Amino acid sequence: QGTLKQNGFWAKNPFWSSTSVDMKILSYQSPAIEVNDKNGVPIQIAVAATYKVRDTYAAKYAIANQEQYVSNQFEICLRELAKKHTYTELVEAATEFAADLETHLEKGGYEVVSARITELNYAPEISAIMLQKQAAVAMGEARQTIVDNAIKMAQHAKERIVFPNAELE
């Protein structure tokens, strides 16, 4: 007729059956799955999380196969997370993943303790192309920084040079 969470000696009606639920913190490491990010770029992503039972009744009787339920919820949340963010945004999206996973797992009586992204890569078929693209963007940003600094140096030099009868423009 309830859940006992305290230590001690307890008696029960011999006509009632009892079952036990493991209250330890559990961990789950998802396999790397290939999904498309917000821009449609294929990526490989995996997460690890720790969780524990919050509601013993729901954990025991609300779901038929606990391991399969947890695995499915991880995959669903991971796919949703990847669809909402680009590759670069996913690095900071672990807290959003943990909150989303908490929402999905609470129906089964679980509570998420922590979650983090353990693997984030471009899919093998496009990794070389995406790395070239990132290198090109970084090169462009570096060149822009050089030009900006050269302009600042010229403006600073212009301010320091004084010609008595001429004006510089």
Image (cartoon, rainbow, N blue to C red):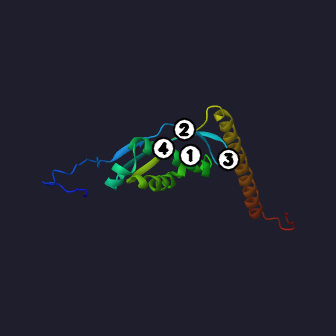
Mark carried by residue 33: 2
Task: Identify residue type, mark 2.
Answer: Ile
Choose between 138 and 154: the one closer to the eye: 138
Evaluate if marks 1 and 2 touch, with contact meaning CB atoms under 8 Å apart.
Answer: yes
Identify the secondary structure beneath mark 2: strand
Displayed quadrant of residue 168 = bottom right
Task: Identify residue type, mark 4.
Answer: Asn
Q: Residues within 10 Å of mark 1 (few under 14, many from 20)?
A: some
Question: Separation of disc 3 and disc 1 at Cα?
Answer: 14 Å
Left or right, 164 with reference to 116: right
Q: Residues within 10 Å of mark 4 (few under 14, many from 20)?
A: some
Q: Please tell me whether mark 3 or mark 1 is closer to you in this view.
A: 1
Residue that label 1 marks: 79
Measuring 52% from the left and 47% from the top, which residue is drawn there?
76
Question: Separation of disc 4 and disc 3 at Cα?
Answer: 24 Å
Residue that label 4 marks: 72
Measuring 70% from the left and 40% from the top, which residue is drawn there?
133
Left or right, 44 with reference to 62: right
Residue that label 3 marks: 39
Question: Separation of disc 4 and disc 1 at Cα?
Answer: 11 Å
From the image, which quarter does the N terminus lie in? Answer: bottom left
Task: Identify residue type, mark 3.
Answer: Asn
- Ranked by sequence position, the earlier of labels 4 and 3 is 3
Task: Identify residue type, mark 1.
Answer: Arg
